[in-house]
């Protein structure tokens, strides 16, 4: 199972793994850390992509709740 740790980061040379935009110092983003098959990884997600993913998640959850009723 993947373990995620969310944190803010301040690095110059990262890109968003969702849209590919270059993340500059002080750009708001989330760094997800995990381990898959014994290998550590980091996934960076910019603020607009975080908002889009959160909205998509909300839509799926609302659909699941509607199906249960």
Image (cartoon, grey):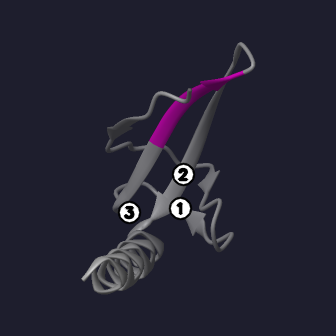
Q: Is 64 on the left or on the right of 69, as rendered?
A: right
Residue marked by disc 2: 44
Query: Residue 55, located in which quarter of the rendered image?
Result: bottom left
Name the residue furthest left.
69
Q: Is 9 on the left or on the right of 18, as rendered?
A: left
Q: CA distance from mark 1 to mark 2?
A: 9 Å
First of labels 1, 2 by sequence position = 1
Numbered tag placed on residue 27 in the rendering: 3
Q: CA distance from mark 3 to mark 1?
A: 6 Å
Numbered tag placed on residue 48 in the rendering: none
Residue at x-position 43% and y-position 80%: 56
Picture quarter with the N terminus? top right
Q: Secondary structure at mark 3?
A: loop
Residue at x-position 39% and y-position 44%: 10
Q: Chief secondary structure of the magenta span?
A: strand
- Horizontal and vertical percent position of residue 33: 50, 32
Residue marked by disc 1: 23
Question: Relative to the observer, which residue lies in front, 61 or 51?
Answer: 61
First of labels 2, 3 by sequence position = 3
Q: Secondary structure at mark 1?
A: strand
User: Which range is magenta?
Assistant: 32-36
- Of circles 2 and 3, the one toward us is 2
- Count of marks overlaid on the render: 3
Query: Residue 37, located in which quarter of the rendered image?
Result: top right
Residue at x-position 38% and y-position 42%: 9
- Confirm whether the magenta stretch covers residue 33: yes
Name the residue furthest front.
69
């Amino acid at each position: 199972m993947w373990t995620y740790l969310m944190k803010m980061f301040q690095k110059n040379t990262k890109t968003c793994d969702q849209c590919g935009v270059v993340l500059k110092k002080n750009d708001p983003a989330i760094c997800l850390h995990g381990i898959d098959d014994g290998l550590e990884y980091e996934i960076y997600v910019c603020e607009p992509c975080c908002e889009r993913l959160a909205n998509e998640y909300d839509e799926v959850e609302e659909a699941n709740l509607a199906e249960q009723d």
